[in-house]
Amino acid sequence: MQITFLGTGTSNGIPMVACACAVCRSDNPRNKRLRSSVWLEKDGHALLIDASSDFRQQALTHNILDVDDVLITHTHADHVFGLDEFRRFNIKYQKRVNVYLSAEADKELRATLRYMYETPRQAGGGITALDNHILQNYQAINIGGFSVAALPIKHGLYEIFGYRVDDFAYLTDCSEIPEKTFERLKNLNVLVLDALRDTPHPTHFSLEQAVAAARRIGARQTYFTHIAHNLEHETTNKTLLPNMQLAYDGLKVII
Ligand SMILES: [Zn+2]
Ligand SMILES: [Zn+2]
Ligand SMILES: [Zn+2]
């Protein structure tokens, strides 16, 4: 499997609008972070996790020519507003795109992106055509040769999904991992975990909390994502072990 980090930034993206801090002004490309998402490829099949608000730019940069299936972690804007870009795939390939998500996320998405799920008065430039598939907690499903499991995690007061895909796991926007989810995270090759900043936050792991969770999970390699402007790439990584590092946009990992 090849994993491509399409974006590793928090909801604002880095640089943030109207911020003049050293990280936002940095010339280092590894301090430039689009909204978080990963693209998985295996045996000619591909799977997207989250359709970030930067999906258009990410698809152009990484030459993503088609999406059949997308796993949605939750419905915050930075994770779903890229769904609107799927119109290109609807029109080009005359097909709908499969969206996998929790029952609660399905309900919220139908409210947030109501125009995609109702018959329009007039279609104009076309409206994204999606087929939503609801996953239950801990449900395992095969999607295009990928073994996917939906793993509940806490995102502040919300319960959202992380996903295990074969021996890879992606837990973004995570502030707590339930015991039962820890049990499903054994024998991982690569783990991706939320690490927002160095100070505590009500809805995200701090770097210290993420490192503690990563130690307990014990994946061969851990990458941190959904990173705010508080963490400079190079100086932060120097404080971390080689098998636990900040990810960056464009990072490709083969497992
Ligand atoms: Zn987010
Ligand atoms: Zn800044
Ligand atoms: Zn979120």
Image (spheres, rainbow, N blue to C red):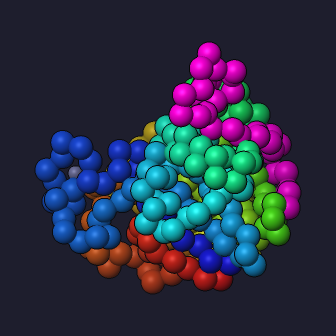
27 or 227, which lies in front?
Answer: 27
Q: Residue at x 85, y 56 (%)?
A: 140
| Residue 84, quarter of the rendered image | top right
Q: Residue at x 18, y 46 (%)?
A: 19
Q: Residue at x 41, y 45 (%)?
A: 11
| Residue 240, quarter of the rendered image | bottom left
* Segment tinted magenta in the rendering: 113-142
Question: What x and y, as percent, mark residue 181?
Answer: 73, 55
Relative to 20, does residue 126 appear above or below in the rendering?
above
Report whether residue 71 is seen: no
Report whether residue 34 is seen: yes
Relative to 183, does residue 100 appear above or below in the rendering?
above
Q: Residue at x 51, y 68 (%)?
A: 63
Question: What x and y, as percent, mark residue 122?
Answer: 59, 20
196 or 207, which lies in front?
Answer: 196
108 or 153, which lies in front?
Answer: 108
